[in-house]
Image (cartoon, helix red, strand yellow):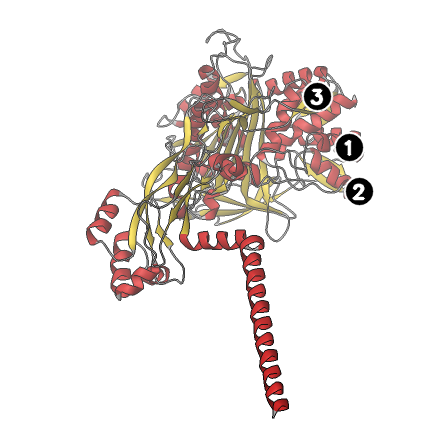
Amino acid sequence: MFLLITSSIEVRRRITGLFFCTLFLFFVFLLLRLAYLQIIRGTWYQHKALENRIREIVVEPERGVIYDRNGKELAVSVSAEACYAIPAEVKKSGKSDIIARELAGILDMEEKKVNELITKEQHSVWLKFKLNKEQVKQLREKNFAGIGTIAKPQRFYPKGNLAAHIMGFAGDYNQGLEGIEVAYDKQLAGINGCLLVEYDAAGHEIPESTRKYVEPEQGLNVVLTIDQTIQYIAERELDKIMQERSPKSASIIVMDPDTGEILALANRPDFDPNKFHDYPAAARRNTAVADSYEPGSTFKIVTLAAALEEGVTNKEEQFYDPGYIKVNGETIRCWAYEGHGSQTLAEVVQNSCNPGFVTLGLRLGVQRLYKYIDGFGYGSRLGIDLPGEATGIVIPEKQVKPVDLATISMGQANSVTPLQMVTALSAIVNGGKLMKPHIVKELSNREGEVVKKHQPQVVRQIISEETSRLEREMLEAVVSKGSGRNAKIEGYSVGGKTGTAQKPAPGGGYSTTDYVASFIGFAPVDDPRLVAIVVVDTPKGYPYYGGTVAAPAFKEVMRDSLRYLEVPVRYQQGEEVPDQEMSVVPLVINLPVQEADKVLKNAGLESEHSGSGEIVYGQVPLDGVKVKKGSKVLLNLHKTDGAEDGERVVPDLKGKSMRDAAELLGMMGLVLIPEGEPYPTGIAGEQDPAPGARLPHGGQVKVKFRAPPGIEVMP
């Protein structure tokens, strides 16, 4: 009995001891766990608690202002109302379909799209930005559940379309998407601020709770090199070209040759960055920087610079042009069918003589010519501070054959950008220094203090100052005596080069109907202040030459820009020495044929008739145009209906050059479609319709041109 009692007490002791040991261990575990949570994981849990209670409201900074070089605002940030939705509240109301339908009408959006947005599985969504006053008023009157408006910084472009391709635009969320806005987005955007607000478990703001405001940092201001006034002048001339010639596109760039600063860069078609959603991507494309084209005769400035610098020719060397030159069995013709005959190098440049430039290219050879093609930056990016710069397309040096060398020398085969051309001419006329083109002058903070200044940067010296001086003189003759006469500016000496390039055809070869007309030039010649290029892609109508389409626009841009910059005139109007070899075409329309012939003869001009009437009903060129003495004036003796839908009698074009045929048909309101193998050149032969047929205004006449047998001329 005693043993049983003793055994029972011992068991109870052990159970009690085990219980207290377990309890002790449990409390130790709790203490360790508490220490772990409080000491080791305490900070983490504090942050998680704050995340649950505190909501961060992002406070967007204002984007920096974009100015022109004179401090004129081109892009600013404004506070505009934006509409947002809180899907949870919309769903809770049970009226999402009704709200979506009415919202779509107010915001001018698709109902399906609105419904998707206001029922999304997220805390909040933006519905539309930049609301007008009427939209804000209607939304506040309706007071939809879960729908509200809030002031939000938005980009505004006070000048509308002006310099649109330079500015680009910022998106709905105030982020840069194109142009300077995206190229300098990091600098313009600034740094977000925030507002921290404490909420309870039900999602309601706790009164008198903890709040913290971190002020946003405004973005830097960007000061451009462009001049608002010169930009306006350039865009004004592009609008004229688009209205008169309806081309696919057109571009103008104006540059300071000594610094590489872009003073104007304009394209058509264009867009309003305030409404960029309303325009197709093609209208927003910066063609002056991003598109390449075969430059035609404007590229001859590079061939000339290389030939002069390498000493393979001189200003007074004599050349002979019979109208063509043969290279490896291939015939390359001059634009002047009859050729230019004997001429000096200066006259080769003045006449833009193809055989003359091919000769220079063949003398240079591939290696030396490519030394300058590469040196001027063709085939590579120049590094302008705009997105989307193209490199152009240059045939690899090792693949260039003699015929390729010949065509490259006169501006075919390789493609370039307008930016590359204007930069190359700047180097040619500024003493031989290739300047890096740039469009941003400096960055400044909100107090106006300059943070970073962009200095002019010389990339490399390409030609000597003497070569630069010689080429300036020869390019001046192109404007004063040659194909660039329409770029002449009274009071200033002007140099330049015209270009009319056939566009490559989709199936190979070159188009017989589509051309790129261009003009590139500078002024004043003795101390160039400005360089500009005008490129017009596929102008409609005739004539389509660079000298008649692009040169007049260059003249207007250069003249008004020089006057605006107060560049002093080199001579007064009327002091120019008249060119004794030129004559102004008189008006002979409505005169009897014999009287018209007499008037033209007295003016030192010849006449050529179309038709057998007794009265002159039309003339090409029109009166007032200055041409060389001895030039022909085409007189139309057919009486045609002056209305747009009147019929025209097709003239006999046999034996005429392509230019004469085109001028005559253009005078009559008809369109020439030249044909020939392998390409149209020479004199007219067969035509369809035949002479005497009747066509409506704008009717097409197909003419086959054949080149007569020529003489082989060695370079």
Cα gap from disc 2 to disc 1, whole angstroms = 16 Å
Relative to 486, is 144 above or below?
below
User: Considering depth in this image, is 38 or 572 the residue closer to the camera?
Assistant: 38
Secondary structure of the residue carrying numbered label 3: helix
Secondary structure of the residue carrying numbered label 1: helix
User: Considering depth in this image, is 357 or 596 the residue closer to the camera?
Assistant: 357
Measured as percent of width and height from the top left, residue 511 is found at 58, 46
* Amino acid type assigned to the residue bearing label 3 in the image: Leu
User: Considering depth in this image, is 239 or 679 the residue closer to the camera?
Assistant: 239
Task: Tell me the number on the disc at residue 345.
Answer: 3
Q: Is residue 656 visible?
A: no
Q: Label 3 near label 2: C-beta < 8 Å?
A: no
Question: Is 442 on the left or on the right of 465, as rendered?
Answer: left
Q: Residue at x 53, y 29 (%)?
A: 253
Measured as percent of width and height from the top left, residue 678 is found at 65, 48
Q: Earlier in the sequence, mark 3 or mark 1?
A: 3
Measured as percent of width and height from the top left, residue 706 is found at 63, 43
Task: Specify the quadrant that holds the C terminus.
Answer: top right
Question: Is 608 on the left or on the right of 457, as rendered?
Answer: left
Relative to 477, is 354 above or below?
below
Disc 1 crowd, CA 10 A, few/some/many (<14, 14-19, 20+): some
Q: Earlier in the sequence, mark 2 or mark 1?
A: 1
Disc 2 crowd, CA 10 A, few/some/many (<14, 14-19, 20+): few
Query: Image quadrant of residue 432?
Result: top right
Cα gap from disc 3 to disc 1, whole angstroms = 15 Å
Task: Tell me the number on the disc at residue 362.
Answer: 1
Task: Tell me the number on the disc at residue 468.
Answer: none
* Amino acid type assigned to the residue bearing label 2 in the image: Lys
Q: Earlier in the sequence, mark 2 or mark 3?
A: 3
The residue carrying mark 2 is: 398
